[in-house]
Image (spheres, grey):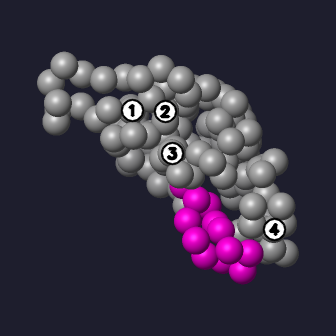
Amino acid sequence: MIAATTNKPGLTPNFRIGDERLVKVTCNAAKKINSLLTKQGRQNGVLRVAVVGGGCSGLQYKMDLQDGPANRDILVESSGIRVVVDPKSALYVTGSELDYVDALQEGGFKVKNPNAATSCSCGESFSA
């Protein structure tokens, strides 16, 4: 990973550059994320992927659109989408693929995570 820093502290966050070995975005997911970023007026924004405690299996994904990376984030560009992951969440999502399924039932964003030991029947949470 490459560190991205600035000579003027406090003006730009200090983050690292990663690659698709951390997280990969499929073409379908990229189209949907691009559409959402455009609707929010954040054409240069990022998708934050985080893992938080909760759900029936103990851990769940949290995704949010933001203006840019924060301090200590890892920034990955995949399928034209900039994804940021905090270092703690990176431990859980390394090797994951983010897809989007456009369907009435069981549609939406799907994470294929090789680190998930088990996941609940609803598919919204996992354990590692």
Question: Compared with residue 59, is residue 42 higher up or lower down, i.e. above or below?
Answer: above
Tag 1: amino acid: Phe
Q: Which residue is mark 2?
A: 75
In percent of the image, x 73 and y 43: which residue is there? 96
Q: Earlier in the sequence, mark 2 or mark 1?
A: 1
On the question of residue 104 being in view, the answer is: no
Amino acid type assigned to the residue bearing label 4 in the image: Ser
Q: Is residue 38 left or right of residue 115?
A: left
Q: Residue at x 69, y 58 (%)?
A: 108
Q: Is residue 101 above or below residue 74?
A: below
Which callout, 4 or 3, points to the residue nearer the camera?
3
Q: Pointer 4: what residue?
A: 119
Q: Earlier in the sequence, mark 2 or mark 4?
A: 2
- First reached walking from the N terminus: tag 1 or tag 3: 1
Q: Secondary structure at mark 3?
A: helix
Q: Which numbered disc, 1 or 4, marks the residue that appears first in the sequence?
A: 1
Q: Residues within 10 Å of mark 3 (few under 14, many from 20)?
A: few
* Mark in front: 3 vs 2: 3
Give the distance between the C-alpha atoms of the residues marked 3 and 2, in whole angstroms.
11 Å
Within the magenta stretch, is there residue 125?
A: no
- The secondary element bearing badge 2 is classed as strand
Looking at the image, tell me whether mark 4 or mark 3 is earlier in sequence order.
Answer: 3
Mark 1 element type = strand
| Residue picked out by circle 3 | 87
Cα gap from disc 4 to disc 3, whole angstroms: 22 Å
Please name whichever residue, 91 or 29, is drawn nearer the observer in this view of the structure. 91
